[in-house]
Amino acid sequence: MPPKPEDCGPNNRIIVWHRFNGAMVADTFQLAENQFMEWWIPYPEAPEGAAKLLDELNKSAKRL
């Protein structure tokens, strides 16, 4: 069963297990194209407060 949109992270990325390369982040379209991606798991939720931290980092980068 292919992943649903809510299972994906940014840019339709998911975490997969590749038979030869191990765990990796892949685009959902790669699942159908690569027979060696054996399973996938939903992308994890961002930690609490991550959005605020990223906003503060962006503000400080603009000041540089």
Image (spheres, rainbow, N blue to C red):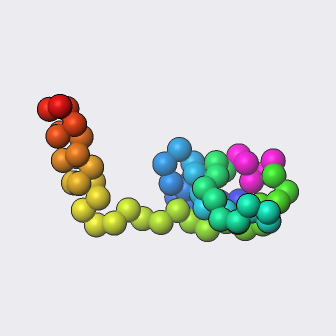
Horizontal and vertical percent position of residue 24? 63, 59
Q: Residue furthest left?
A: 63
Please tell me whether the stretch drawn in magenta is mainly helix, strand or loop.
helix
The image quarter in which residue 18 lies:
bottom right
Vertical order, 63 against 31 (above or below): above
- Is residue 56 in view from this perspective? yes
- Residue lying at 71% horizontally and 46% vertically, measured from the top left: 29
Provide residue 4's location: percent of width, then percent of height: 61, 58
Q: Please state, as top left, top right, bottom left or bottom right, where the N terminus lies in the image.
A: bottom right
Quadrant (top left/top right/bottom left/bottom right) for the C terminus: top left
Q: Is residue 24 left or right of residue 51?
A: right
Q: Residue at x 17, y 40 (%)?
A: 60
Would residue 9 appear left or right of 18 to someone viewing this image? left
Q: Is residue 64 left or right of residue 7?
A: left
Q: Give the left or right position of residue 15, taking residue 43 as reference.
A: right
Q: How many marks?
A: 0
Please give the range of residues in magenta.
29-33
